[in-house]
Image (cartoon, grey):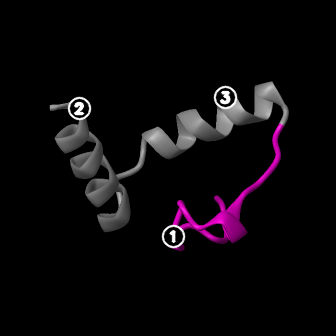
Amino acid sequence: MDPDWGTDPYDLANLQTLCRTCHISKTAEENRREPSPEQLDWRRMLEEMIG
């Protein structure tokens, strides 16, 4: 598990460089979790922008 889980995932200081395989694995793991309040806010903002 990522020790920084719960921090702002959109903070530029929280970026991580991953190879393609690790990115796919990490993304799949993160998508199985309940979204954080920040993620829910981000999704709502995107949905409003899309229409």
What separation in Å lies between label 1 and label 2 (alpha carbons)?
A: 23 Å
Quadrant (top left/top right/bottom left/bottom right) for the N terminus: bottom right
As for residue 24 lying within the magenta part, the answer is no
Label 1 crowd bin: few (<14), some (14–19), many (20+), radius 10 Å: some
Q: Which residue occupies the foreground of this view, 28 or 46?
A: 46
Residue displayed at 17% across by 43% down: 48
Q: Which amino acid does label 3 sit on?
A: Ile
Secondary structure category for the residue under label 2: helix
Q: Nearer the viewer, mark 1 or mark 3?
A: 1
* Above or below, 11 relative to 39: below
| First in residue order: circle 3 vs circle 2 | 3
Span highlighted in magenta in the image: 1-18
Query: Which quarter of the picture shows residue 5?
Result: bottom right
Where does residue 33 sit, x and y in percent of width and height?
A: 41, 49
- 18 left or right of 12? right
| Upstream in sequence: badge 1 or badge 2 | 1
Three-letter amino acid code at disc 1?
Answer: Asp
Q: Name the residue under label 1.
A: 8
Within-10-Å neighbours for mark 3: few <14, some 14–19, many 20+: few
Mark 1 lies on a secondary structure that is loop
Q: Position of residue 7 (x, y in %)?
A: 54, 73
Residue that label 3 marks: 24
Quadrant in which residue 13 is drawn: bottom right
- Give the left or right position of residue 19, taking residue 24 as reference: right
Q: Which mark is residue 50?
A: 2
User: What distance separates the C-alpha of mark 1 from that of mark 3?
Assistant: 20 Å
Q: What residue type is labelled 2?
A: Ile
Provide residue 39's location: percent of width, then percent of height: 36, 56
